[in-house]
């Protein structure tokens, strides 16, 4: 294997510190979905916990279980996908916080919580339609949640939602919907202590969206938004750097990385890699190999950085094919070794 992903945990810690300074007064929830954005969930969570992070957003039960086993019972883990009764029961056994986005799941969680009150965060759909309880059903569902709370099955500890982060006007409308939902929940007797609405971009740019928790994923890994401010402007740096060895030198330089490793074939002819002799265009991308314009000092066995620190970033590559940096990072195959530095 001539390809590897270097994961700089020191840079992760520095990014976390920068974000916490920015959102001062709001607690950070580190989102670790998709194996911590393909950086390796156990190593990422362990380092983040050592840096003082106590909230993790795990998306699914399998990821949440890995977080729990990594940090023990000293952290809160928020999960918002639990489909079957078995998954809900596992989540209860792991002492997770449930993100509940529909009335049916609310009933399922309450029914499974026999000897243990389930901690529930009710989700209002603020217009993104990324699950969540519709506004016209919100008061009724909140009242039902209050009944279940009084019966001892659940504790509604939070209210949350996603926003599009597409425009200030749309996000302002979503925030008004969110605030209205909080007022209605309190009017029917609920008393949530945790409100969370913002992800990376809104957490950084708009203090009024932070509330009690800020769910930050991409920025913690040094992945900036496509078409947005630079990493330097955000005071973050890429945590992951993707490397490949030179396997042959001729008219072109052959690299031991291809689309099966996660390098999008559509990048061919559209991006450059940095070499000791300057930038060279990546001309072709095959299944397991790629080819770049040659350079005088190229030698077999030499490592070349595809993206990362002091090279093009994941988002730089993403912009070449009109996507987002998260997609580039998440495409790195599990077969690619992760090296932690």
Image (tube, grey):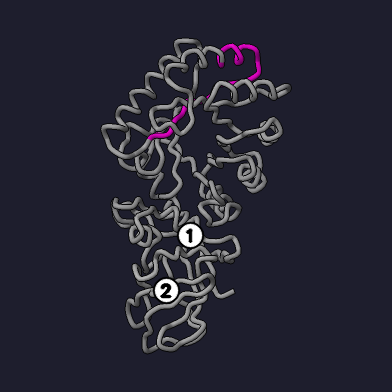
Q: List x then y, in percent, for residue 13.
A: 47, 54
In the rendered image, the quadrant that contains the N terminus is bottom right
Q: List x then y, in percent, for residue 312.
A: 36, 66
**Contact? badges 2 and 1 (CB < 8 Å):** no
Q: What is the span of residues highlighted in magenta in the rendered image?
A: 145-163
Q: SS for tag 2?
A: strand
Name the image quarter holding residue 90.
top right
Q: Nearer the viewer, mark 2 or mark 1?
A: 2
Residue position marked by numbered label 1 in the rendering: 10
Q: Nearer the viewer, residue 272 or 212?
A: 272
Q: List x then y, in percent, for residue 269.
A: 35, 71
Q: Is residue 95 placed above or below 6 in the rendered structure? A: above
What residue is at 42 percent from the left and 59 percent from the top? 238
Q: Nearer the viewer, residue 209 or 337?
A: 337
Q: SS for tag 1?
A: helix
Residue position marked by numbered label 2 in the rendering: 284
What residue is at 56 percent from the left and 61 percent from the top? 333
Q: Is residue 51 magenta?
A: no
Q: Is residue 261 placed above or below 299 in the rendered structure? A: above
Mark 1 Cα-neighbour bin, 10 Å: few <14, some 14–19, many ≥20:
some
């Amino acid at each position: 294997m001539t390809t590897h992903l270097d994961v700089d945990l020191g840079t992760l810690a520095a990014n976390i510190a920068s974000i916490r300074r920015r959102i001062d007064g709001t607690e950070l929830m580190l989102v670790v979905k998709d194996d911590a954005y393909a950086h390796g969930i156990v190593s990422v969570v362990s380092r983040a916990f050592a840096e003082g992070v106590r909230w993790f957003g795990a998306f699914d039960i399998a990821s949440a279980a890995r977080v729990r086993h990594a940090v023990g019972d000293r952290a809160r883990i928020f999960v918002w996908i639990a489909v079957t009764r078995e998954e809900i029961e596992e989540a209860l056994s792991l002492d997770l916080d449930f993100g509940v986005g529909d009335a049916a799941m609310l009933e399922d969680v309450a029914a499974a919580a026999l000897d243990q009150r389930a901690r529930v965060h009710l989700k209002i759909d603020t217009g993104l339609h990324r699950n969540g309880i519709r506004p016209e059903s919100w008061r009724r569902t909140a009242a039902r949640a209050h009944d279940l709370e009084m019966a001892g099955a659940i504790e509604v500890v939070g209210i949350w939602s996603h926003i599009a982060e597409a425009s200030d006007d749309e996000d302002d409308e979503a925030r008004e919907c969110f605030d209205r939902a909080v007022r209605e929940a309190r009017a029917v007797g609920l008393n949530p202590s945790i409100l969370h609405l913002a992800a990376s971009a809104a957490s950084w740019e708009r203090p009024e969206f932070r509330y009690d928790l800020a769910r930050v994923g991409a920025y913690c890994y040094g992945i900036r938004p496509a078409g947005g401010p630079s990493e330097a402007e955000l005071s973050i740096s890429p945590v992951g750097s993707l490397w490949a060895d030179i396997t042959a030198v001729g008219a072109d330089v052959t690299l031991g990385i291809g689309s099966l490793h996660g390098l999008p074939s559509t990048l061919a002819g559209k991006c450059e890699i940095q070499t000791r002799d300057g930038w060279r265009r990546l001309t072709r991308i095959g299944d397991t190999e790629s080819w770049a314009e040659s350079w005088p000092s190229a030698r077999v066995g030499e490592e070349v950085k595809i993206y990362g620190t002091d090279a093009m970033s994941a988002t730089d590559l993403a912009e070449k094919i009109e996507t987002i940096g998260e997609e580039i990072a998440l495409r790195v195959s599990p077969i690619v070794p992760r090296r932690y530095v």
